[in-house]
Amino acid sequence: AQKVTQAQTEISVVEKEDVTLDCVYETRDTTYYLFWYKQPPSGELVFLIRRNSFDEQNEISGRYSWNFQKSTSSFNFTITASQVVDSAVYFCALSGLLSGYNKLIFGAGTRLAVHP
Amino acid sequence: DAEITQSPRHKITETGRQVTLACHQTWNHNNMFWYRQDLGHGLRLIHYSYGVQDTNKGEVSDGYSVSRSNTEDLPLTLESAASSQTSVYFCASSVGSGGPNEQFFGPGTRLTVL
């Protein structure tokens, strides 16, 4: 079965704190892709990153970084020095051959609130 | 600029009525998807299409149908609306080749079934 678990329903931090959003996935595929999307209060879904299962290098983009560990089936997302504008719901998603290669399976999402 | 639009943005209907939600993309993407978003469930796939005349059922397809007569549009029809279909609906599209690509999402339609 293909499954994505985001165990943290809500996280609340104060501005400038670092915060990590957890994502654990299950798949029988040997080739698969992982995604993160952001949904700000305005409601639209914004693509953040796509990572394939052969690339375990960590990714950094400004204050955002992603840690992919196949050994623990995790693809965690860290925001460094959080800002109020980071307040949003964040979704982790999985796509693999068994699920239909272009389909995304989403986790339930983590709501991040960053307070001034 | 290319975009993906949904209409209406908000809809209130009554139980038993047929409702159609529109999705139009100008990306010229082969793949199109419909999701519903409910608290605690994230986004769940309703139907999807990999090209004209192609449609497939997703995880939560009961009570919904789609048709794909051209590349740009994938309307979602609720055959007989039920209160359990009150939700926010998102349409998305993606390039059809090179593995699972980034999906571009529409702004969403908030549907209330009374």
Image: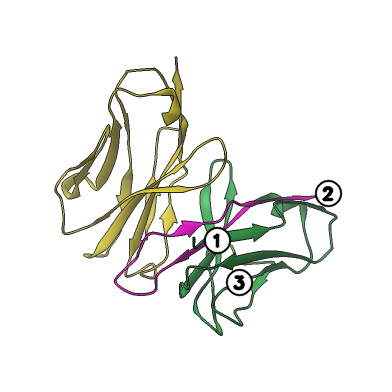
Counting residues from the start of the chain, the first of labels 2 and 1 encountered is 1
Highlighted range, magenta: B89-114
The front one of B85 and A90 is A90
Left or right of B51 on screen, residue B76: right
Give the image quarter of residue B6: bottom right
Residue B95 highlighted magenta (yes or no): yes
Q: Amino acid at mark 3?
A: Leu
CB atoms of marks 3 and 1 within 8 Å: no
Q: Colour of chain A?
A: yellow
For image coordinates 67% across by 65% down, the residue present is B22
Q: Amino acid at mark 2?
A: Leu
Q: Position of residue A96 (x, y in %)?
A: 32, 65
For image coordinates 66% across by 72% down, the residue present is B65
- The answer for how far apart the CA atoms under marks 3 and 1 are is 11 Å
- The answer for how far apart the CA atoms under marks 2 and 1 are is 28 Å
* Residue that badge 2 annotates: B114
* Residue that badge 1 annotates: B4
Q: Amino acid at mark 1?
A: Ile
Q: Position of residue A33 (x, y in %)?
A: 29, 59
Counting residues from the start of the chain, the first of labels 2 and 3 encountered is 3
Q: Position of residue A85 (x, y in %)?
A: 44, 28
Q: Position of residue A51 (x, y in %)?
A: 25, 54
* Residue that badge 3 annotates: B74
Disc number lying in front (3 or 1): 1
Indicate whether B13 appears above or below A77.
below
| Category of crowding for the residue at label 2, using alpha-carbon neighbours closer than 10 angstroms: few (below 14), some (14–19), many (at least 20) | some
